[in-house]
Image (tube, rainbow, N blue to C red):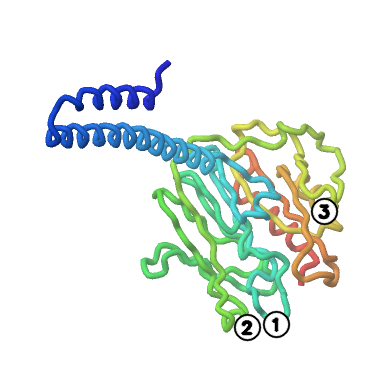
């Protein structure tokens, strides 16, 4: 096989031999032509590789972006959940003490995310609901305030917003202006982001990766085993219709997981972390994220009712 470089060298050698029989002016013209030929071949080769790299990168990037992922550890690490085209409802949690920001004299938050998940990639047509788990504090969710796209009104603790259905592709940032005064002075903004795409992929249940019976006890997550799949039942890949995240004290995670199961909700995955507060009354120093799912037999109202009941049992104050 002859490479592009081999061809270039042979053409150059032949051209040089022929150029010996012509005068200096012609030689200059021939040399210029040879240089242009070599440069052109090189640029074509470079352009081919460069463009191929760009195409490959773009394809890879899009595939990665569109690949559903609701793993609890990933949501903790990246703040982002990626939903499949089969998911119709996303319930975003406002975690307890979310109204406190970074840089306050005393860190009051449990987790460095204002919302769980703080960012989400969703399919066009997905319905989003915000649920407040911030005890003794009120919130308002606002999207594009200047255009009046969405205003939830006041959300007391353990209440849900009206649903917002996203039928337009694009990025939608949202905020909650109800934050601690010291956080305001520090420039903290309680914000999240939703990216709406034409999702080509289906969200698969972790239940199919590790089948665990509904009566299997859940072991609290330790430092050595921080991320685990803890499904309550084997859910069909295409039957996940609603997804949400919840936060509970790790020391009582077994009890709360069972509460979710008893109410017909599945636990897709869990992740425990040392919280920002350290040792706090009744909550310990470690919290656990529960990523839960529901199939079409569980309505959104039923799921929200379950969250209210479980939330009222939490020791957060």
Q: Which mark is residue 105?
A: 1
Q: Left or right: where does residue 150 sit relative to residue 132?
A: left
Q: CA distance from mark 2 to mark 3?
A: 32 Å
**Nearer to the camera, 225 or 170:** 225
Q: Nearer the viewer, mark 3 or mark 1?
A: 1
Q: CA distance from mark 3 to mark 1?
A: 30 Å
Residue 20 visible, this orientation = yes
Residue found 54% across the figure and 62% down from its top: 192
Dot 2 or dot 3, earlier in sequence: 2
Picture quarter containing residue 239?
top right
Disc 1 crowd rating (10 Å Cα; few below 14, some 14-19, many 20+) is few
Q: Position of residue 37 (x, y in %)?
A: 25, 32
Q: Which residue is mark 3?
A: 253
Picture quarter containing residue 1?
top left
Disc 2 crowd rating (10 Å Cα; few below 14, some 14-19, many 20+) is some
Q: CA distance from mark 2 to mark 1?
A: 8 Å
Residue found 61% across the figure and 79% down from its top: 183
Q: Are marks 3 and 1 in contact (CB under 8 Å)?
A: no
Q: Is residue 119 above or below residue 1?
A: below
Q: Nearer the viewer, mark 2 or mark 1?
A: 1
Q: Which residue is mark 2?
A: 182
SS of the residue under disc 2: helix
SS of the residue under disc 1: loop
């Amino acid at each position: 096989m002859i490479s592009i470089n081999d061809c270039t060298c042979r053409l150059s050698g032949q051209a040089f031999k022929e150029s010996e029989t012509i005068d200096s002016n012609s030689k200059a013209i021939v040399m210029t032509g040879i240089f242009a030929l070599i440069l052109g071949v090189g640029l074509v080769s470079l352009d081919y590789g460069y463009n191929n790299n760009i195409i490959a990168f773009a394809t890879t990037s899009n595939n990665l972006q569109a690949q559903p992922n609701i793993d609890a550890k990933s949501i903790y690490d990246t703040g982002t959940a990626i939903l499949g085209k089969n998911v119709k409802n996303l319930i975003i949690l406002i975690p307890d003490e979310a109204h406190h920001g970074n840089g306050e004299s005393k860190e009051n938050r449990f987790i460095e995310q204002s919302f769980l998940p703080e960012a989400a990639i969703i399919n066009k047509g997905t319905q989003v609901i915000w649920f407040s788990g911030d005890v003794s504090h009120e919130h308002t969710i606002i999207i594009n305030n200047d255009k009046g796209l969405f205003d939830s009104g006041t959300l007391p603790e353990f209440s849900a917003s009206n649903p917002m259905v996203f039928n337009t592709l694009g990025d939608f940032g949202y905020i909650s202006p109800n934050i601690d005064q010291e956080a305001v002075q520090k420039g903290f903004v309680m914000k999240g982001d939703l990216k709406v795409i034409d999702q080509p992929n289906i969200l698969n249940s972790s239940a199919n990766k590790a089948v665990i019976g509904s009566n299997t006890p859940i072991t609290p997550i330790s430092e050595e085993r921080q991320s685990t799949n803890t499904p309550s039942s084997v859910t069909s890949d295409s039957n996940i219709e609603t997804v949400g995240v919840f936060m509970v004290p790790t020391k009582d995670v077994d009890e709360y997981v069972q509460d979710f199961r008893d109410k017909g909700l599945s636990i897709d995955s869990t992740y425990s972390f040392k919280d920002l507060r350290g040792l706090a009354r009744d909550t310990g120093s470690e919290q656990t994220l529960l990523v839960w799912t529901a199939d079409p037999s569980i309505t959104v109202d039923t799921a929200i009712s379950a969250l209210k009941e479980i939330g009222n049992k939490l020791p957060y104050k």
